[in-house]
Amino acid sequence: MTTQSTTALLAEFPPVSQDDWRKLVEAELKGAPFDKKMFTATHEGITLKPIYRREDVANLPHVNSLPGFAPFVRGANASGYVKESWDVSQEIAVASPTEFNFAARNSISRGLNALNMVLDRATRNGLDPDWAAAEDVGFGGLSIASLDDLNRALDGVDLEQMSLFVRSGASALPFAALLIALAKKRKKSLARLHGCIEMDPLGVIAHEGKLPQSFEGAYREMAALTEWAAKNAPQLQTICVHSRAWHEAGGSAVQELAYTLATGVEYLRQLAKLGLGVNIAAPRIRFAVTVGTSFFLEIAKLRALRMLWSRAVAAAGGDETAQKISLHVRTSQWNKSVVDPYNNMLRTTVEAFAGVLGGCDSMQVGAFDEVLRTPDDFSLRIARNTQLVLQKECELNHVVDPAGGAWYVENATAEIAARAWALFQEVEKAGGMEAVMRAGVAQKSVAETAAKRIKAVTSRRDSIVGVNQYANPKEKPLEVVATDARAFHKRRAQQVASHRTALEDEDSQTVLNWLAKVIGLTGADLFGVSVEAVSAGATLGEITRALRINDTPSEPITPVCITRAAKPIEGLRAAMNRRADGPAKVFLCNMGTLKEHKARADFSRGFFSVGGYDVVSPAGFKTPEDAVAAFAKSGADIAVLCSVDDNYPALVPALTAGIRSHKPGATIVLAGYPAEQIETHKQAGVDEFIHIRADVLEVLSRIHERLGIR
């Protein structure tokens, strides 16, 4: 078809103007206000338009950028996933080295190509099991104390082929010494080691409130490990900036990005003071970003972070290579539920899809049951296969930045980036991330956002399917297997003690000599000596003691409160499940014709199902006497009056009087909120009103209390 004929054809279909579209929408809204119905306010302070047009991105400079070029908003690699796909990672939070090895090898044989080791609290704090509190050993992950432990955990794992991501908290150097000693023992090339031994002191103190060493000591360890890695293991990263604390505490995407960016910049600043320039430090940093279910905004968040990190590194004097971000994505726990937990599979699928479209380099999809128990083989397999389906079946690696150019996504990317950069600048003006956290500013800001988000859930403006909407009160909860933490602690303490006593006197003296050399050293030499000490038989805890012999723990701060949006409502369900007599019964007094009562009867059933109540909804009653008689036979504790507002003045007095005559302590609820009638109905005996604006948590908590449910 020629250009002329194409033009003639298009002339037959003239473009529709924005005004024409708006008139059509307003007609469909039937008088409802356009601005109120068609625009959506987000927790980021961004107002989403109902439709985006070319002019919305006309002045955005990043739109014309290409993948592989600064500011890398469209990806750090020019070929995207076409040449090499993202790493399929999976957290294996198993306490025993032997059990970890079994789970790891099983997962690797089924598609995993990046091993994500989550260490227990004792190991992250640099403590051997016999020096740690019982509750810290095995808590949240893998217990590692010696080279033998790590050898068992990674038995059969090729250190040159497998990416290792190790959640080591503030104790990356002691763990890295174990890993490098193991690689040398196996005669592996250090230049081929890849992954990240994740040191993140600001991230640790954000959600734990304390560090096992001072910040000065932490940065000394970070610099020593980073300098050594840059010289000897150039593919091994040593620092990880986690956004988890801010995301899982309920922060907005803007807060999450700003505080994450400020943390990364703080690490660059501190390493520069210790002699490591930005072009050495920046490539050693990995970002681990948590992604939620606000699909398009999460894509925009990841794209915005790449752009902001490029800008920050450039401002610090970094070259274009240093400006590229290494981006790991992890699915959220904030929006996951203990009740109706299989819905979590759907949530993580949406989050994983957003992570891929946002351009992650590696990904961890959480198991659907991870918020209430240690994931089993089934849940891990489903989580792992979520990524494999996206990778192998959906063909997402055949196109570069598929979200790029979409007016909505590009506009959201720019707006999130601008707001996050402004907040980041406030943090910098206040003295940096540590100063802002010590002042409690960041924690308070995120807590305020979280309170608004939880309020939106409890008032059901924001939905969590299966929790505050479409709840199933008859579901059977998943079984949680109890573990004996003290028995595990005792076993691990004995293993470490046996390791120490097994050393000959001469070997023990060699260990002591190497540990003595650790004290006072700095830079790459410090890490090199630590590796020699481990090779001689030193434990992780012994290395840590030598490192920090002249150091003291940091001053504690108030941490963020990591929680889940569903947790308050889940508390209602849990309390009902513990009730000795079973779920409390709710009887719907459906009055009048089906048309008159059905809408509010359906609403009432859904409302009370949220709290785990047993709802009885009979056919409509013609008279109050019939409804009262049926209520008396039901044995219910709660009666809900369901009809239209016009019928209530005549019905309510008779119904409340009749119900009270049969059960004086009954709770009487009216479905709806007829504003002019409220006081009259209260005087007649109505205890509660449920309606679309009611806070389900507040109302059901009061009813729980009346029934003695704690």
Image: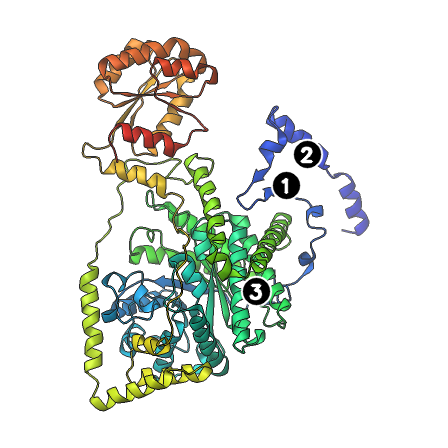
x, y percent for residue 346: 41, 48
- Give the class, few, some or many, for how many residues have Cα within 10 Å of label 3's Cα (few <14, many ≥20): many
Where residue 278 sits, quadrant-wise, is: bottom right
Real-space CA distance between mark 1 and mark 3, rounded to the nearest whole angstrom? 28 Å
> Foreground: 387 or 454?
454
Mark positioned earlier in the residue sequence (2 or 1): 2
x, y percent for residue 187: 37, 86
Where residue 544 sits, quadrant-wise, is: bottom left
The answer to whether 338 appears left or right of 242 in the picture is left
x, y percent for residue 604: 37, 26
Mark positioned earlier in the residue sequence (1 or 3): 1
Which amino acid lies under the numbered mark 1 shown in the image of this protein?
Ile
How is the structure coloured here?
A: rainbow
Q: Which residue is mark 3?
A: 80
Q: Which quadrant: the C terminus?
A: top left
Which amino acid lies under the numbered mark 3 shown in the image of this protein?
Gly
x, y percent for residue 456: 46, 38
Q: Which mark is residue 532?
A: none
Q: Which residue is mark 1?
A: 51
- Circles 1 and 3, Cβ within 8 Å, touching? The answer is no
Real-space CA distance between mark 3 and mark 2, rounded to the nearest whole angstrom? 37 Å
- Give the class, few, some or many, for how many residues have Cα within 10 Å of label 2's Cα (few <14, many ≥20): few
The relative height of residue 114 versus residue 411 in the rendered view (above or below) is below
Q: Which residue is mark 2?
A: 21
Mark positioned earlier in the residue sequence (3 or 2): 2
Secondary structure type for disc 2: helix
